[in-house]
Image (cartoon, grey):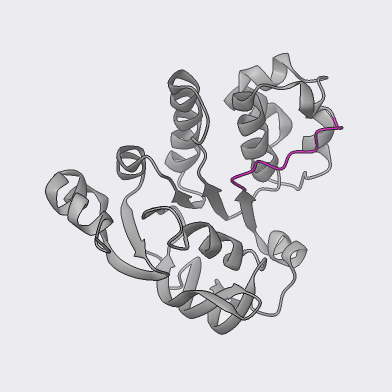
Amino acid sequence: MNEVPMLKVSNLRAGYGATVILDGISFEVGLGESVGILGRNGVGKSTLLRTLMGMTTLHEGKIWFGTTALEELAVHRRVQQGIGLVPQEREIFRSLTVAENLRIAQRPGYWTTDALLELFPRLAERWRNMGNQLSGGEQQMLAIARALVGNPKVLLLDEPSEGLAPVIVEQVFQALEQIRDRGEMALILVEQHTSLALSFSERVIVMDRGQIVHHGASAELKGDPQRLARIIGIAH
């Protein structure tokens, strides 16, 4: 890990209005690292990603992007700093073409439209199609590509496999592995498919009731399914 982490959060308490969902969340991620976020539905995983993007009410805590404090920055300023989000709902612009979706988000860097069309050949085939003319898998590919074209240093992925057929999940994760293996970006992955998250990430954070209940190497839990089941079901 770099001497100065790419992303560091300390004692986060956040939620929606007066309702606190996250309570005392602390962790850090170095450039090039991949971290999986696991836990049952409703434990605060998506809220954590939304808090990093500035989309929730922050009650307490610090968020550092390198040496820059993010707590007071609006969402668009965090994007400009170098944080990208692939939201669970995908949120592509359905009335714009694939080309237009990418063009409006583009910033200088490695991930040009040419590089993205090589990563996702199906988007090249749908280049002039509107967002609402794409399949679910193609919309997910476009959501990832739109985040990448901004050339972030930290990429947040919220349930990228949700609702996709197994063959499309495989294609999406093959692309994510290429992104990860370049080593130029930190990736934080929220994923309900535990085996996918453990195979993809170096480290894993398990959440329960808005808190971190486990943080360690993914390989350790992958090799111990009984312990994994115990930790994931800790509230039971």
Tell me: residue 172, above or below residue 82: above
User: Where's residue 152, x and y in %?
Assistant: 63, 52
Q: Main secondary structure of the magenta part?
A: loop
> The C terminus lies in which quarter of the figure?
bottom left
Report whether residue 158 is seen.
yes
* Picture residue at 20% right of the left edge, 50% below the top: 229
- Total of numbered circles in the picture? 0
Please state if 36 lies on the left or on the right of 132 as rendered: left
Using the image as rendered, state which of residue 79 and residue 115 is in the foreground: 79
Q: In the rendered structure, which segment of residues is drawn in magenta?
A: 87-96
Please state if 142 lies on the left or on the right of 165 as rendered: right
Name which quarter of the figure residue 50 lies in: bottom right
User: Where's residue 56, x and y in %?
Assistant: 64, 70
Using the image as rendered, state which of residue 122 and residue 58 is in the foreground: 58
* Picture residue at 76% right of the left edge, 48% below the top: 107
Name which quarter of the figure residue 110 lies in: top right
* Picture residue at 33% right of the left edge, 60% below the top: 206
Q: Is residue 193 magenta?
A: no
User: Where's residue 155, x and y in %?
Assistant: 56, 51
Using the image as rendered, state which of residue 157 and residue 24 is in the foreground: 24
